[in-house]
Image (cartoon, rainbow, N blue to C red):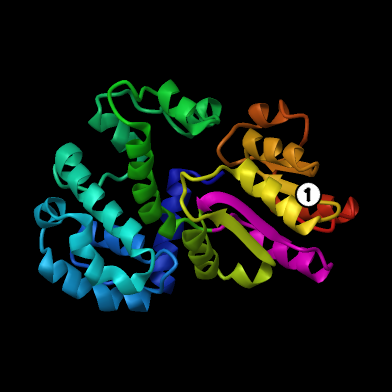
Amino acid sequence: MKTPQDVRAIVQALKELYPDGICSLQYQKDYELLFATRLSAQCTDERVNQVTPALFAQFPTLEALAAAEPEDLEPYIHSCGFFRAKARDIVFASRMLLEKYHGKVPGTMEELLRRRGLPPLGGIAHYREVFRFPIRDYYADIGFDFAREDYGALADEWALLYGELAADAPLREGVPEALERLRRAGVRLTVLSASERGMLCRQLRQRGVYELFDEVLGLDDFRAQDKLGIAREWRARTGAGRTLMVGDTDHDALAARAIGADCVLLTGGHQSREVLLRTGFSVLAAPYEAAEYALQSENETI
């Protein structure tokens, strides 16, 4: 696992290699980038950049966006697709930023906890021990009180924050090489995620691996269905043969069992090695090991 010093060194090296690298979304304020990122789901950055100047000219402040109704925004963002849901999210987020965060975009889950006067997670090792499914139970474990605030609102809040942070998250080392090896061997590759499908496809394209996958399975509404439901629908629709699930949580193991698939779990994700071992499936440390496992077990789909 990379240390904070390693991460800073990597970021500095990238800045030196790509001194002119910039975000393609145009914005002047941090919340404008947040909302532009939301608009870009299942839409192109080029289209978003055509839409946002008029939107932010009509609603030039967070206060103006918060005072609006979703239908007031819809004509400005109609061409971005899913405009009703996106307008609702932007108005909701504007009100939340003003009411809870003094008009500032929070940076991490630690910030969400701090704003509520809750204790911090205490580092990645502790996070990997306490993280669990259902997500609502994990939130309750770390201090969120759903007698005082709505879980759906918190989920919306985190989804907006995640959408901004995920843009800078790199692929895990060794993933492209493992995927390419499996493709050369004729293995069908499918992404199964509880992320919004449009955002998921965009992230895969940005990292240069979208074309390696035969299918991308995600949510059209990130609260509408869970991963198990998507997995069962996929199995019923495709009738796929020998299948291997590669994941990093015990929930991935549960999804594998739900469709009768084998499973390997990689360390370094949401949960500790000890938690993953309790599933009874193989626990590996690197993507190339998962690729080797898949080829040796002659799986047709991963």
Mark 1 is surrounded, within 10 Å at the Cα level, by few (under 14), some (14 to 19) or many (20 or more) other residues, namely: many
Q: Tell me if I can see residue 173 in this picture.
A: yes
* 11, above or below 158, in the image: below
Q: Which residue is mark 1?
A: 244
Residue at (18% x, 46% y) in the render: 95
In which quarter of the view is residue 78 placed?
A: bottom left
* Residue 12 shown in magenta: no
Residue 118 appears at what percent x and percent y?
Answer: 30, 24
What element does badge 1 sit on? strand
- Residue 44 in percent (x, y) is at 40, 74
Q: Quadrant of residue 29?
A: bottom left
In depth, the one of 179 and 59 nearer the eye is 59
In the foreground, 94 or 87: 87
Left or right of residue 167: residue 172: right
> For the C terminus, which image quadrant?
bottom right
Task: Determine the residue located farthest toward the front in the rendered image.
Answer: 71
How many dots with numbers?
Answer: 1
Horizontally, is 208 left or right of 75 in the view?
right
Residue appearing at x 26%, y 55% in the figure: 90
Amino acid type at mark 1: Leu
Q: Which stretch is magenta?
A: 171-195
Write down the quadrant of residue 129 in the picture.
top right
Return the x and y of residue 31 as percentages of the image width and height: 22, 56
Where is 297 relative to 59, above or below?
above
